[in-house]
Image (cartoon, rainbow, N blue to C red):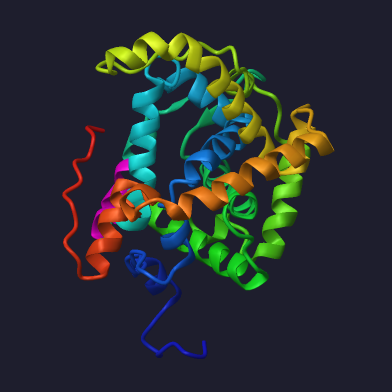
Amino acid sequence: MQGLSKASGPGDAARTPPPEPVPFAPGSVLWDLAGDVRMLFALPAALVLQVAHPAVGAGVDDHSVFRTDPWGRARRSLQSLQLWVYGGEQALEEGRRLRRLHRTISGTDRHGRAYHALTPAYYTWVHATAYPVFIRAADCLSRPLDEDEQRRLYDELLRLGDILGIHRRDMPPTPEAYWRYFDSMVRDELEATTVVRELLDPRRPVALPDGSPALLRRLWPLLRPPLARLNVFVTTGLLPPAARERLGLKWSARDERRLRRFGAVVRRTVPLLPERLRYLPLAYAARRSAAGLPSPAVHLAPR
């Protein structure tokens, strides 16, 4: 074959390990997006898309502690996500850790079909949900990504998949192919699973984590209902329209205007905050370090 020496054979490529993924650095789209505090509004929408797949929803339903330890699970998930982008060499170990963690997650979904968390189609879907949610969140809460930025973002999500152990052959190769894949997944796979219904129920009881300040504990019965309604509203609004329709979620033109007004407030307010409040802790420390400035130590939660 052209490009191979006479001594090489078809088995040589299989025996050659792929190169180690390259950690992210300043100048990438993800470096700017993933650590922005506004992404906290977007992550629940990505989670809803993930668990709308029956296999993923069953895995979370059967194995996750999102009901018994919602704050702890959210903190650990957020820390993991931040490590992927801002962890440098730690990102590679975090990707390996996640694959080890998911090796034991298996069971049967509500249709009686066996699932395993590392089945490529399911593991890939979890990763792939980031793309439409990042684009929608940027459009509503910060600034729209132009076509070039959307293409760069997709290329970076492919690189992020390398870190997480997702083979390129399992991901659509281009944004155009992605949207065909996404439309088919929404049409043929997604449904309003038990976990979707729970996550989008504003009446879902969520207790404060242990150690919360006494004043906050006293005020929580008053604060929780409006905060829960806001969370469900923003989460629903940041879902792609096709997914909302598939899941039977109502969304009107009036709702869209309300979301845009909320986004305008967020868009004006967040840039006024000091940098340590505009970015999540790992992102803030990584940005400071990359700029040659003293960076705070970040204590990672047990995982």
Residue positioned 59% across, 54% down in the render: 138
Say left or right for 127 vs 301.
right
Q: Say above or below: 32 vs 72.
A: below
Give the residues drawn in magenta, as a range: 89-98
Q: Work out whether residue 160 or residue 284 is closer to the camera in this orientation and state it.
A: 284
Q: Work out whether residue 17 or residue 212 is closer to the camera in this orientation and state it.
A: 212
Q: Is residue 103 visible?
A: no
Residue positioned 25% across, 55% down in the render: 285
Say left or right for 7 vs 153.
left
Q: Position of residue 7 (x, y in %)?
A: 36, 86
Does the magenta-highlighted stretch encompass residue 284? Answer: no
Q: Say above or below: 36 vs 118.
A: below
Q: Work out whether residue 120 or residue 128 is closer to the camera in this orientation and state it.
A: 128
Image quarter of residue 230: top right
Secondary structure mostly taken by the magenta-highlighted segment of the chain = helix
Residue positioned 72% across, 56% down in the render: 179
Image quarter of residue 97: top left
Q: Say above or below: 26 vs 36.
A: below
Tell me how many marks there are.
0
Q: Is residue 147 visible?
A: yes
Residue positioned 35% across, 47% down in the render: 277
Indicate the quadrant containing the C terminus: top left, top right, bottom left or bottom right: top left
Q: Say above or below: 36 vs 207.
A: below
